Image (spheres, helix red, strand yellow):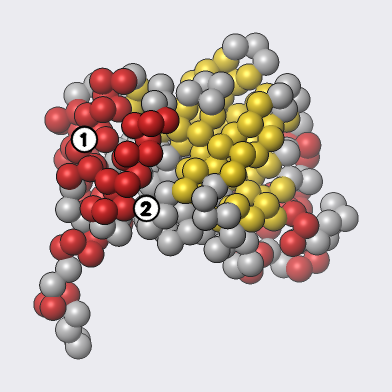
Amino acid sequence: MSSTPRVLFDNGGHKVLCFDQLVTGDGVQSNQFLIIDHGQHALLDPGGDLTYMPLSLALSQHIVVRDLTYVFASHQDPDIIASLDKWFLHTGCKVVCSKLWARFLPHLSAAFLTRAPGMSTTERMVAVPDRGQDIPLGKCVIKALPAHFLHSVGNLQFYDPVSGILFSGDMGASLVDDAEPVSDFAAHISTMEGFHRRYMAGNKACRLWANMIRRLQPRMIVPQHGRPFVGAAMIKEFLDWISQLECGMDLMEQDDYQIP
């Protein structure tokens, strides 16, 4: 296990770090991200108890953890935000999430913890509407993008216009043990296909999402699990693949709904 992050972008005033080696034991490999811009910071999808201690120690080498500005949560899963109570207790951060989860995520935290920095749970949640919104960070904004049903009903992705990086959550995730950039897309499909067929809701949502991302033209797509897609050519291969993938409800038959 290494706490040394990958530097995905650094222009002096704006930095993006990826922590991809913090999960040990039986947990699925996951990536945590930190965006720093002119003294403010956003931590993306920090995970649960499995990653909290190694992640907070790794963060302390780059920022004053108690001064963390935001935690961004793409959706509600344990590997995304189960450590919410600890971030509430040990920092003054606000938590950015879909409005569909803003009233549910506080169930992960004891009531007395949420008031520790002097704010109520409600005051510390930034509830993003279905159409998304811009989140100010330092001298830039991070775009919270709608990614409904990919796979959560209230799902967000986060785009950093300065670095050109799209943090895509579970979209593009691969079941591998590292976060090296994809170099051979055809060979990489086998690490993604089963996951996407089971976890994405259906092809329509995938196609609509891909259309949005083509307009966005990111330089890099970085999922929460596994390897990123870097450069226009590799991103095009992924978007073309996901646009035609049958998944979720596309695959359901009556045999899948039987009384056991």
Task: State whether residue 34 appears in this view.
Answer: yes
Image position, residue 58 (x, y; %) = 62, 32
Residue 66 picture location, percent across and down: 78, 40
Does 161 sit left or right of 103 as displayed? left
Task: Report the mark closest to the observer, 2 or 1.
Answer: 1
Name the residue type under label 1: Asp
Instruction: Evaluate whether residue 180 shows in this view.
Output: no
From what the image shows, is residue 9 above or below residue 54?
Answer: above
Q: Tell me the amino acid under the disc marked 2.
A: Leu
Mark 1 and mark 2 in contact (Cβ < 8 Å)?
A: no
Q: Nearer the viewer, residue 122 or 208?
A: 208
Residue wearing tag 1 = 240
Residue at 74% in and 54% down:
124
Q: Residues within 10 Å of mark 1 (few under 14, many from 20)?
A: some
| Snapshot quadrant of residue 3 | top right
Residue corresponding to mark 2 = 150
2 or 1: tag closer to the N-terminus: 2
User: How many marks are shown on the rendered structure?
Assistant: 2
Q: Nearer the viewer, residue 119 or 219?
A: 219
Of 146 and 163, nearer the camera is: 146
User: Which quadrant is the C terminus positioned in?
Assistant: bottom left
Residue at point 23%, 64% (across, down): 249
Most distant residue in the bottom direction? 259
Q: Is residue 22 left or right of residue 247?
A: right
